């Protein structure tokens, strides 16, 4: 492994990250083709997941791909799916070396892309920036390995972890710089999810504005009884931007029909202990193809996800403001008696955003 391998792989990873949120159910892969130290092709998996990154980068490189090195942020595919295998395309173009951090977790690929390349005499180097690549593809890996999407829980709260005053005033606790960052984060997820209480209280639209993106994230509301206002922003825009409503088995059929009638997609899930079983909710979202879900509260849904150990990442924006104990807590009761029962996360990033602070934490597996 050389320093230029690391440098070009870092570029391939950053190209891959650009497509996060746009390619589900496929991973967002970056590919850079380098000949004699010069970049002759670069691409990201297209919105919707196809074409894959490699054929696009190869098309740019043309004849220059012969004898070149391809840096790909995930193992090139080996299966005949909707498109011919990328491993074959690299071989046919005469690529001499392929550098990829990790094997693909899709059982149709899982090492066979590397095998094919090696069998054709292509040098294959793995492991470069593997940890960073695993973090970028975490949602895709979770879905292929466990059937559920990665869940990121975001909150924007006061210093003392409150998201509104006792009267429900919440606009604004964090500033415009942090709020813009939240929009960019939404854009990098396949779906944005909230609980019914937040949908009722805030009347959010959950859209991504000013990002010039092709695919808006799916908007998901979790509402056991489907008791949501039909005149809400979410409901009114359901024909233009996907709106999925997750509900329990015991909903009023007239409500069900009304929501379907306005263009929402309804997903029925089971109950567990009188509440929606969030594990089966996430399995249903995985079955529907989602790999990355951005949960924006409220406190009830956040607490239930945490209690079921279904939160993979925390994103917090903290404002220099104190609301006090009568304010609305960002996270509802978890019912813990001992600290040892509290879900633990490790810090991956912390930095200022205007007057606020972002901190990002990843679940520590215990
Ligand atoms: C690559 N490069 O850019 C991507 C890959 O349904 P298909 O035929 O498009 O195949 C989807 C699978 O291809 C997906 O599950 C993953 O294994 C791989 N994604 N592979 O070589 C890419 N996006
Ligand atoms: Zn492919």
Image: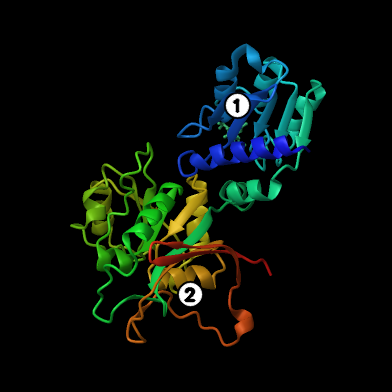
x 64%, y 49%: residue: 132
Q: Which numbered disc flags the more N-terminal residue, 2 or 1?
A: 1
Identify the residue at the far top of this view. Answer: 63
Instruction: Give whichever of 88, 7 is nearer the camera.
Output: 7
| Image location (x, y in percent) of residue 56 | 54, 23
Evaluate whether residue 278 shows in this view. yes
Residue 54: numbered disc: 1
Q: Relative to residue 36, is residue 345 depicted above or below?
A: below
| Image location (x, y in percent) of residue 353 | 42, 61
| Image location (x, y in percent) of residue 322 | 36, 81
Ligand 1 within 8 Å of disc 1? The answer is yes
Residue 102: numbered disc: none
Q: Nearer the viewer, mark 2 or mark 1?
A: 1
How many numbered marks does the figure carry? 2
Crowd rating for badge 1 (residues with CA inside 10 Å; few <14, some 14–19, many 20+): many
Q: Quadrant of residue 1?
A: top right
Task: Answer with left or right where residue 84 lies relative to residue 118.
Answer: left
Task: Answer with left or right where residue 66 lies relative to residue 266.
Answer: right
**Which residue, given by chain and number where applicable, does mark 2 sit on?**
273
Q: Quadrant of residue 363?
A: bottom right
Instruction: Give whichever of 361, 200 is nearer the camera.
Output: 361
Q: Relative to residue 253, is residue 23 depicted above or below?
A: above
Task: Answer with left or right where residue 276 lies relative to residue 145.
Answer: left
Instruction: Give whichever of 364, 125 is nearer the camera.
Output: 125
Image quadrant occupied by the C terminus: bottom right
x 21%, y 58%: residue: 232
Q: Secondary structure at mark 2?
A: loop
Crowd rating for badge 2 (residues with CA inside 10 Å; few <14, some 14–19, many 20+): few
| Image location (x, y in percent) of residue 149 | 53, 53
Q: Secondary structure at mark 1?
A: helix
Evaluate whether residue 221 shows in this view. no
């Amino acid at each position: 492994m050389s320093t230029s391998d690391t440098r070009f792989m870092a570029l391939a990873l950053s190209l891959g990250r650009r497509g996060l949120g746009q390619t589900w159910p496929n991973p967002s892969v970056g590919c850079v083709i380098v000949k004699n130290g010069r970049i002759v092709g670069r691409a990201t998996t297209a919105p919707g997941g196809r074409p894959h990154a490699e054929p696009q980068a190869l098309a740019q490189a043309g004849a220059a791909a012969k004898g070149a090195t391809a840096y790909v942020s995930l193992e090139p595919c080996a299966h005949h799916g909707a498109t011919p295998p990328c491993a074959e395309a690299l071989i046919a173009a005469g690529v001499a070396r392929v550098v990829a951090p990790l094997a693909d977790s899709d059982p149709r690929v899982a090492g066979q892309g590397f095998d094919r390349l090696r069998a054709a005499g292509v040098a294959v180097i793995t492991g470069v920036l593997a940890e960073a690549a695993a973090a970028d593809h975490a949602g895709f890996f979770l879905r292929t390995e466990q059937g559920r999407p990665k869940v990121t829980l975001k909150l924007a709260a006061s210093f003392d972890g409150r998201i509104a005053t006792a009267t429900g005033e919440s606009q604004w606790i964090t500033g415009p710089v942090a709020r813009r960052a939240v929009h960019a984060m939404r854009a990098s997820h396949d779906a944005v999810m909230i609980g019914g209480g937040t949908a009722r209280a805030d009347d959010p639209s959950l859209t991504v504005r000013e990002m010039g993106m092709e695919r808006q994230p799916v908007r998901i509301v979790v509402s056991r009884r489907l008791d949501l206002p039909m005149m809400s922003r979410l409901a009114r825009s359901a024909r233009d931007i996907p709106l999925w409503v997750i509900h329990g088995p015991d909903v009023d059929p007239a409500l069900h029909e009304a929501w379907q009638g306005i263009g929402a997609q309804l997903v029925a899930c089971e109950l567990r202990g009188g509440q929606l079983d969030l594990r089966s909710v996430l399995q249903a979202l995985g079955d529907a193809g989602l790999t990355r879900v951005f949960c924006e509260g409220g406190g009830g849904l956040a607490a239930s996800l945490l209690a079921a150990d279904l939160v993979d990442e925390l994103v917090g924006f903290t404002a220099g403001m104190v609301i006090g104990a009568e304010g609305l807590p960002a996270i509802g009761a978890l019912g813990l008696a001992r600290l040892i029962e509290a879900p633990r996360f490790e810090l991956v990033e912390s930095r200022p955003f205007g007057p606020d602070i972002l901190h990002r934490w990843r679940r520590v597996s215990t």
